Amino acid sequence: MPPLTDPTASRPPSTNHAWPALLLLTTGFTLSQAFRTIAAIMAPPLQAEFHLTPQQLGVFAAAFHFAFGALQLLMGIGLDVHGLRRTVLAVSPLMVLGAAVSALAPSFAVLVAGQVLIGVGCAPAFLVCTVYIARHFAPERFAAVSGAILAVGSSGMLLTGTPLAWLIEASSWRMGFWVLGACAALSWLAIARWVPEPPQPAGLPAERESLGQAVRAFGQLFRLPHTLGIILFSLVTYAAFVALRGLWLGPMMMQRHGWGLVAAGHLAMVISVVALIGPPLFGRADPGPRGRRRWLVGFTLFVAALFAGLALGPGAPVAVALMLLMSAVSGYMALQYPDVKDAYPPAVMGRAMALFTMATFMGVALMQWLTGAIASAAQAHGVEPFAAVFGSIAALLAAGALAFRWLPQPPSVTASGR
C-alpha cells in the first residue's frame, strides 16, 4: 500500500465509455436522494396517523441516515476489496424491501425499521459514483464530473416535492413508498443488466486484501492529523441542508405560515430545482486545494447566517427568499469531494470516501434527531420550535467551519501554503 500521506497518483483519462456505466450507477443515488427527503412532505400525514411528537418525527427522519452512515466503512471495504458492481448489487435490494416494509407499517416502530432497511440499501449509492469517478476519470476532471453527478442524482429530490404531495393527497403516504420501491427495483435491474464490473485500476494491489488488512487501512486514515477536521466539517454541512429540505421545510411553512401540503410541496420542488444548478458550477470553478478550503469555510459561514435569519421568524416571503438563497449556494458542498480526493492516495480512495460519506450522513442523522429533540424541548418551555431548530443549526455550522479552518490541514494544502 502506498503511504497515506502521498496524495499524488495518476488516473486513467476520461473516456466516453465511462459515462454510460456512471449514469446507470447514478440512478441508485437518485433514489437515495428521494428516500432521504421524504420526511418534509410525509411529516404531516405521518404525524396525523401515528400521533408523532416532533422528537419522534426527528427519529423517523434520522433512522435512514443512521443506517446509511453506519454502513459506509463496510461499503468502502466492499468497493476496494470486492468491486463496485458486486457491492451495489448485493446491498441495494434492501431499498426495495425497506420501502415495502414502510408502506405496510402498522406502527411507528415498524415504520422506523423500514427506514433502517432503506438506509442500508442506499449505503453504497453515491459512494460508488465518487470512487468510479476517482478511478476512471482524469484527476483534473474529478471536481467537474462529481459536481455534475451530484446535480443529476439530486434530481431525486424533485420526486419528493410536488409529485409526492399530489400522490399523498390523491392516495396516501403509503403509496409514496410503493412508487419509490418500484423505481429502486428498476434501478437494480438496470445496473445488473448493463453495468459490468470495471477493471481494477492501475496503482492498486493485484491481490485482494483480507478483511483484516482493509480494516487496518481504515485505522491509518484515523491516525492522520487532517482527518479530524474533515470529519467534523462533514458532520454539519450537508446535514444542515437536509434538515431544512428533508424535514423542517414542510412543517415550518404549514405551522408557522399556514400553507397547505401541496403549496409546501411546490416550494420543496423549487428549492430542489435551484439546488441542482450549484454543484456543476462550483465543480467547474474549483480553485484548487488552498482556495477550495477558503471557499468551503466562507460559504458555510454564509449559510449559517441564513439559518440565523430563519430563526428570527421572518414573514413567509423573506423566509422563502432565505431558503432559495441557501439552496442556490448549497452547491459549494460539491467541493468537499475533491478536497477529500486530494487528501488521500488512490489505494485507499474507496475507504477515504467511505469515511467522509459516513461522517456526512451520520451528521444528517444526528442533526435530524437533535433538532427533533430541540423542537420538543422548545415546545415544552413555550419557545417557538422553529426558532430553536434553525438557531441551533446556525451554531453547529459555524462551529464546524471553524474546526475545519483551524485543525491540521492535509498535505495538498500545506504544500501550497496556508
Image (cartoon, rainbow, N blue to C red):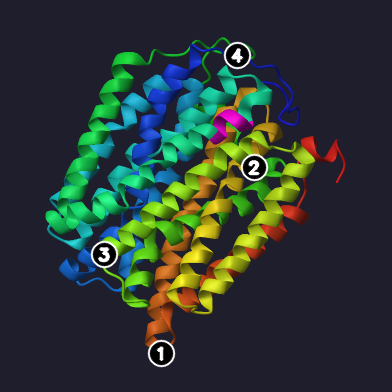
C-beta proximity under 8 Å, tags 3 and 1: no
Whole-angstrom CA distance, mark 3 to mark 1, is: 25 Å
Q: Mark 3 or mark 2: which is in front?
A: 3
Q: Which residues are magenta?
A: 143-147
Q: Amino acid at mark 2?
A: Phe
Q: Amino acid at mark 1?
A: Gly
- Dominant SS type (magenta): helix
Which residue in the protein does label 4 denote? Answer: 205
At x 68%, y 50%, the residue is 296
Q: Mark 3 or mark 1: which is in front?
A: 3
Whole-angstrom CA distance, mark 1 to mark 4, is: 60 Å
Q: Mark 2 or mark 1: which is in front?
A: 1
Other residues around mark 2 within 10 Å, as few (<14) / some (14–19) / many (≥20)? some
Q: Earlier in the sequence, mark 1 or mark 4?
A: 4
Other residues around mark 3 within 10 Å, as few (<14) / some (14–19) / many (≥20)? many
Look at the image and tell me whether residue 240 can be seen.
no
Which residue in the protein does label 2 denote? Answer: 222
The disc label shown at residue 382, or none: 1
The disc label shown at residue 261, or none: 3
Indicate whether 390 appears above or below 287: below
Q: Earlier in the sequence, mark 3 or mark 2?
A: 2
Whole-angstrom CA distance, mark 4 to mark 2, is: 22 Å
Quadrant in which residue 347 is drawn: top right
Whole-angstrom CA distance, mark 3 to mark 4, is: 53 Å
Q: Earlier in the sequence, mark 2 or mark 1?
A: 2
**Which element carries disc 4, helix, strand or loop?**
loop
**Which element carries disc 2, helix, strand or loop?**
helix
At x 59%, y 24%, the residue is 134
Q: Earlier in the sequence, mark 3 or mark 1?
A: 3
Other residues around mark 1 within 10 Å, as few (<14) / some (14–19) / many (≥20)? few
